[in-house]
Image (cartoon, helix red, strand yellow):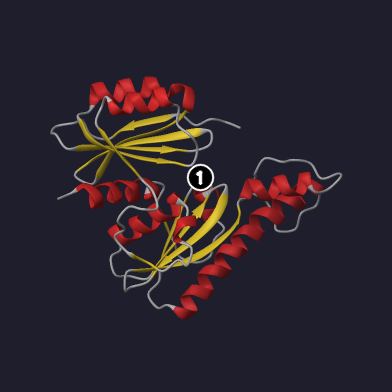
C-alpha cells in the first residue's frame, strides 16, 4: 500500500486558541490544526513519524486544546507527548453531541460516524444531509432538518470488494483499484474492475435516489479516501469534501469545551 504523507500549511499562526486534531487509524494518523474553525494545517502520517510531526507542530503553532479520536491504540509515550502540548479531550460515546442521536445502539456507533454527523450539523444546520464516507467501509449517515441523527448504512469499501473476490475464490487475482475504460469487461481483470467500480457507484447512486424520494432538498456529501476515485462515475449531484471528518472532530472539541 502506498503511504500518503502530505503536509499542507495554508496560513501561518497569528494568535492563540488553536486546536490540534489527532485521528488515529489502524495504520495511519491524521493530524490537523484549526484556528477559529478554519483548517490551517493537515497531514497524514505513518505512526512511526508521529513524534517528529508533533515536534514540528509544537514549534510552528500555539496549541491550546487537543481532540484525540482513535480506532486503534496509541502508544503511551505518544500520548505523553501530546499531554506536554495541551490538555487532551478524547472523543468517545459519552461526550455531548450537537445533534439528537436516535441510533438504537449509540454505544456501537463509530466515532468517525459521530464526527461526520457533527460536521453535517456544523456546516449544514437544519437541513437534510446524507454523508457518504468511502473508506475501508462505505458508511452512509443521515441527519434530518430537525437536527436528528437517524442512522444510515454500512457496506464494503472498494478495496474490500477486490480483497473478497481474491480471498473467497480459487483463481481471481488481487487487483489494485482502477477505473475501468469500459462498462463491459473484456478480460478477467477488466471484468473485476467493472464489477467493483460500477457496482459501488450504482450502490451509491441508488442509495442517494432512495433518500431523495423520501427527503426533499437533500444535501449529499462524499468524503473518504476513495471519494475522488469514485466521484466521476456517480450520477447524482454531490459535494466532495476531503476534510469533513476533521471539521466534525474540531466541532465536537469546541462543542464540549467552550464555556
Q: Quadrant of residue 203?
A: bottom right
Which quadrant would the N terminus be assigned to in this image? top right
- Report the front residue among 111 and 239: 111
| Residue furthest out toward the right | 170
Q: Residue at x 62, y 50 (%)?
A: 158
Taking the spot 52% from the left edge, 57% from the top edge, the residue there is: 139
- Horizontally, residue 168 falls left or right of residue 248, namely right
Residue found 42% across the figure and 26% down from its top: 76
Label 1, on which residue? 225
On the question of residue 116 being in view, the answer is yes
Vertical placement of 207 versus 135: above or below? below
| Residue found at x 24% / y 24% | 60
Residue 31 x, y percent position in the rendering = 37, 34
Q: Secondary structure at mark 1?
A: loop
Against 1, residue 257 (above or below) is: below
Residue 47 image point, x, y percent: 47, 27
- Residue 111 position within the rendered picture, expressed as x and y whole percent measured from the top left: 43, 50
Q: Determine if residue 180 is in view.
A: no
Q: How many marks?
A: 1
Answer left or right for 129 relative to 181.
left
Measured from the top left, where is residue 129 in percent x and y? 39, 66
Instruction: Tell which of 137 and 3 is nearer to you.
Output: 137
> Which of the pair 26/206 is nearer the observer?
26
* Disc 1 residue crowd, few under 14, some 14–19, many 20+, Cα 10 Å: few
Amino acid at each position: 500500500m502506498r503511504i500518503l504523507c502530505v503536509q499542507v500549511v495554508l496560513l501561518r499562526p497569528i494568535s492563540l486558541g488553536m486546536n490540534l486534531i489527532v485521528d488515529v487509524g489502524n495504520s495511519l494518523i491524521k493530524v490537523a490544526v484549526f484556528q477559529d474553525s478554519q483548517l490551517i494545517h493537515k497531514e497524514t502520517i505513518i505512526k512511526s513519524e508521529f513524534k517528529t510531526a508533533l515536534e514540528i507542530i509544537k514549534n510552528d503553532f500555539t496549541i491550546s486544546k487537543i481532540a484525540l479520536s482513535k480506532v486503534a491504540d496509541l502508544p503511551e509515550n505518544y500520548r505523553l507527548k501530546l499531554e506536554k502540548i495541551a490538555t487532551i479531550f478524547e472523543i468517545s460515546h459519552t461526550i455531548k453531541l450537537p445533534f439528537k442521536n436516535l441510533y438504537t445502539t449509540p454505544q456501537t456507533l463509530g466515532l468517525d460516524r459521530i464526527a461526520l454527523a457533527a460536521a453535517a450539523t456544523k456546516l449544514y444546520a437544519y437541513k437534510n444531509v446524507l454523508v457518504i464516507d468511502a473508506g475501508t467501509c462505505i458508511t452512509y449517515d443521515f441527519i434530518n432538518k430537525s437536527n436528528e441523527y437517524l442512522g444510515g448504512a454500512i457496506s464494503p469499501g472498494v478495496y474490500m470488494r477486490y480483497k473478497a473476490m481474491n480471498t473467497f475464490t480459487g483463481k481471481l487475482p488481487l487487483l489494485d483499484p482502477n477505473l475501468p475504460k469500459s462498462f463491459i469487461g473484456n478480460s478477467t481483470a477488466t471484468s473485476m474492475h467493472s464489477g467493483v467500480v460500477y457496482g459501488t457507484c450504482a450502490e451509491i447512486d441508488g442509495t442517494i435516489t432512495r433518500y431523495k424520494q423520501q427527503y426533499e432538498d437533500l444535501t449529499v456529501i462524499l468524503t473518504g479516501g476513495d471519494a475522488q476515485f469514485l466521484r466521476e462515475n456517480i450520477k447524482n449531484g454531490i459535494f466532495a469534501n476531503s476534510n469533513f471528518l476533521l471539521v466534525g472532530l474540531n466541532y465536537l472539541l469546541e462543542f464540549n469545551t467552550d464555556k
